[in-house]
Image (spheres, rainbow, N blue to C red):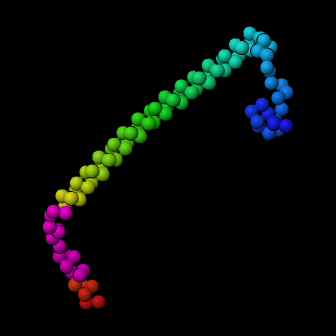
Amino acid sequence: MSGPNGDPDISAEGIIEDEDEFNEEEYAAIDSMLDQINSCLDDIEERNDALNGKLQELLESNRAARRDFRQQITDHADLPPPANDDEDEQSRDAQKKD
């Protein structure tokens, strides 16, 4: 037999259909639990918003760093290649002899 929402193997027995069966203490307990859940959800939402803000800052910082890096590459592409020092020439001469 399926349950009230179509879930398999869940019986409808024990489901309270008449709200008058709850007493004031049970309503107060449920209300307290819902308040705790709401408080936890608010905390999670605040953390999510804080993380989202930090991720946006990181994204912008990363984009700026990439722009700067590309600009440096572009600026250096216009310059002549660096002059070779004596060690580089000696190492190339040694490689040619081998």
Q: Tell me the magenta residue range.
A: 77-92
Q: Compared with residue 64, is residue 26 higher up or lower down, i.e. above or below?
A: above
In reply to whether residue 79 is colored magenta, the answer given is yes
38 to the left or right of 64: right
Q: Compared with residue 49, is residue 94 higher up or lower down, i.e. above or below?
A: below
In reply to whether residue 84 is colored magenta, the answer given is yes
Q: Residue at x 25, y 51 (%)?
A: 68
90 to the left or right of 44: left
16 to the left or right of 52: right
Rendered location of residue 31, percent (x, y): 66, 16
Q: Residue at x 53, y 27 (%)?
A: 43
**Splitting the image into 4 quarters, where does residue 51 fall?**
top left
**Splitting the image into 4 quarters, where does residue 20 fall?**
top right
34 to the left or right of 88: right
**Splitting the image into 4 quarters, where does residue 22 fall?**
top right
Rendered location of residue 46, percent (x, y): 49, 28
Between 27 and 10, the residue placed more toward the observer is: 10
Q: Quadrant of the N terminus?
A: top right
Q: Residue at x 41, y 37 (%)?
A: 54
